[in-house]
C-alpha cells in the first residue's frame, strides 16, 4: 500500500507513535509518506520506501494566524494526484482530521476516493478537543473519518462521553520497539553521572502543565530526605521548565537534578535508570512509561486515564491517587531500598512491555486499513 501519515513532528507521544508506525509499515514493504511541518524527531534513518513532505505555510502580512490546516489539506490533495496514495492516516484530531476531511471533499470532486483513518491520542480529546472553541469541528471531523482508532479503552470511552460520535472507535494500543528499548550496558554513563553509586530516578515528558513535573521534584526531594542517595534525570523540555527549576531551588535539590533536554537516545538514559515517575494529571496511555518499562524500569504513576491499565499496581510499579506525593514518595523509597523487590518489579515491567510489542500492533493497523478499504469499496464505511 501507499500510505500517507500525518502527524506532529515534535517531542510528544502522538508524533512518536505516528513515526514509529510509519517506520514499521515501511519495514513490512509499504511505501510510507510522512507529512508534517518539520522532520519528525524519530525519523532518524533513511529508507528507500519512506519519504518526508514538509508542509510549509507562506507568510502574508494579513495572516496573524497562518492557515497551516489549509496548507496541509492542499498538500494532501497534491500528494494523491502525484503519488497514488491508498490511504491517509492522521494522528491527533486537531487539525489533522479536519484537513483530511477537506482534502477528501476536494479529491471526491476529482473522482478520487481516498479513505481517511484518524487516530485519537489524548489531549486532542481530553483537553484541546473539549475546548468549546474547537468541539464542533473536532466532533464533525471524527465522524467524517472512514475509520477511527483510539490508543486506549479509556480514550475511546472518553471520546464517546464528550462528543456525539456516530463512528465506531477501534482501540489499537500504543506500542514499543522492544529490541531498541531494552536495558543495555551503559555502566560508563551511569558512573559519569553517579560516581558514588547513587540511584537514578528519571522523568521524560514535554514539560506541559498536565505532566505535573513539579510533583516529580517533590517526590525526588522526599526520596533524598529519606537518606537514599539519588540523582534525578529530567528528559525533555517545555513550558513548565522554569517552574520546575524554581521548585528545584525551593527544595534545595538543584545539585542532584540534571536537566538533559530533548534527547534522541532515550533508551540509553532509561538503561541506567532505577525508577520512572509519571505523576500526570491526564494520560490516555503513557507511552513514555511504556518505553521505560521496556528498559526494565519500574514506574510510579498516578491512577488516571489509561495508566492503571499499563502500569500494574505492585507488579510493574505503583499506581497512586493523583497528587498524592506522600504515597508516591513512600513507594519510591521502599522500592529503591529493597533490591529484591526492585528486581521483581523490573522483570515484570519488561514482561508487561513485551505485551505491547511493535510488530503485533503494526499488524493490527495493517488489518484495520484493509478492513476500512474493503468496507469503503463495498460502500459501508464512514461517510
Ligand atoms: O500530551 C502529551 O504527552 C503528548 C500527547 C500527544 O498526543 O502528542 O500524548 C498523548 O498521546 C500519547 C501517544 O498516544 C499517549 O501515550 C499520552 O498518554 C497522551 N497524553 C495525554 O493524554 C496527556
Image (cartoon, grey):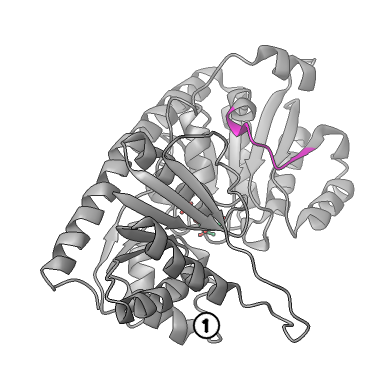
Count the marks: 1
Q: Position of residue 135 (x, y in %)?
A: 47, 83
Q: Residues within 10 Å of mark 1 (few under 14, many from 20)?
A: some
Mark 1 CB within 8 Å of ligand 1? no
**Is 266 covered by the magenta stretch?**
yes
Q: Is residue 319 visible?
A: no
Q: Nearer the viewer, residue 344 or 6?
A: 6
Q: Where is residue 379 in the image (x, y as percent from the top left)?
A: 13, 73
Question: Which residue occupies 41% across, 60% down?
Answer: 82
| Secondary structure state at the residue bearing disc 1 | loop
107 shown above or below 63: above
- Residue that carries the numbered disc 1 in the rendered image: 134
Q: Can residue 349 be seen in this view?
A: yes
Question: Which residue occupies 79% across, 15% down?
Answer: 196
Q: Which of 381 and 171 is in front in this view?
A: 381
Name which quarter of the figure residue 8 lies in.
Answer: bottom right
Q: Nearer the viewer, residue 173 or 39?
A: 39
Is residue 82 shown left or right of residue 364? right
Q: Where is residue 256 in the image (x, y as percent from the top left)?
A: 82, 33
195 shown above or below 316: above
The range drawn in magenta is: 259-267
Question: Which residue occupies 82% across, 52% down?
Answer: 247
148 shown above or below 270: below
Q: Position of residue 181 (x, y in %)?
A: 50, 29
283 shown above or below 251: below
Name which quarter of the figure residue 41 lies in.
Answer: top right
**Is 264 covered by the magenta stretch?**
yes
Is residue 138 shown left or right of residue 249? left
Q: Which of 217 and 355 is in front in this view?
A: 355
- Quarter holding the C terminus is bottom left
Amino acid at each position: 500500500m501507499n500510505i500517507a501519515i500525518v502527524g506532529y513532528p515534535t517531542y510528544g507521544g502522538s508524533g512518536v507513535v505516528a513515526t514509529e508506525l510509519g517506520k514499521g509499515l515501511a519495514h513490512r514493504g509499504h511505501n510510507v509518506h510522512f507529512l508534517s511541518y518539520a522532520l519528525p524527531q524519530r525519523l532518524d534513518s533513511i529508507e528507500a520506501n519512506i519519504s518526508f513532505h514538509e508542509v510549509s505555510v507562506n507568510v502574508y502580512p494579513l495572516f496573524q494566524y497562518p492557515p497551516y490546516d489549509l496548507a496541509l489539506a492542499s498538500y494532501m490533495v497534491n500528494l494523491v494526484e502525484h503519488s497514488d496514495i491508498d490511504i491517509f492516516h492522521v494522528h491527533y484530531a486537531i487539525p489533522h482530521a479536519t484537513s483530511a476531511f477537506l482534502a477528501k471533499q476536494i479529491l471526491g470532486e476529482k473522482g478520487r476516493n481516498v479513505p481517511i483513518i484518524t487516530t485519537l491520542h489524548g489531549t486532542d480529546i481530553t483537553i484541546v478537543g473539549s475546548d468549546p472553541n474547537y468541539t464542533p469541528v473536532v466532533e464533525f471531523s471524527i465522524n467524517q473519518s472512514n475509520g477511527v482508532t483510539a490508543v486506549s479503552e479509556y480514550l475511546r470511552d472518553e471520546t464517546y462521553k464528550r462528543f456525539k460520535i456516530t463512528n465506531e472507535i477501534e482501540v489499537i494500543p500504543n506500542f514499543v520497539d522492544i529490541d531498541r528499548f531494552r536495558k543495555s550496558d551503559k555502566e560508563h554513563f551511569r558512573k559519569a553521572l553517579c560516581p558514588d553509586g547513587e540511584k537514578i530516578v528519571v522523568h521524560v515528558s514535554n514539560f506541559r502543565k498536565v505532566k505535573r513535573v513539579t510533583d516529580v521534584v517533590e517526590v525526588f526531594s522526599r526520596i533524598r530526605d529519606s537518606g537514599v542517595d539519588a540523582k534525578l534525570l529530567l528528559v525533555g523540555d517545555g513550558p513548565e521548565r522554569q517552574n520546575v527549576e524554581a521548585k528545584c531551588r525551593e527544595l534545595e535539590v538543584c545539585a542532584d537534578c540534571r536537566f538533559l533536554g530533548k534527547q534522541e537516545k532515550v533508551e540509553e538514559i532509561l538503561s541506567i535508570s532505577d525508577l520512572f515517575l509519571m505523576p500526570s494529571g491526564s494520560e490516555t496511555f503513557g507511552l513514555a512509561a511504556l518505553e521505560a518499562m521496556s528498559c526494565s524500569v519500574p514506574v510510579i504513576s498516578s491512577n488516571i486515564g489509561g495508566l492503571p491499565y499499563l502500569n500494574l499496581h505492585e507488579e510493574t510499579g505503583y499506581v497512586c491517587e493523583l497528587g498524592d506525593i506522600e504515597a508516591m514518595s513512600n513507594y519510591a523509597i521502599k522500592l529503591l531500598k529493597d533490591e529484591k523487590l526492585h528486581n521483581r518489579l523490573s522483570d515484570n515491567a519488561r514482561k508487561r512491555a513485551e505485551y505491547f510489542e511493535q510488530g503485533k500492533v503494526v499488524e493490527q493497523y495493517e488489518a484495520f486499513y484493509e478492513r476500512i478499504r474493503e468496507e469503503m469499496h463495498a460502500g459501508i464505511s464512514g461517510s
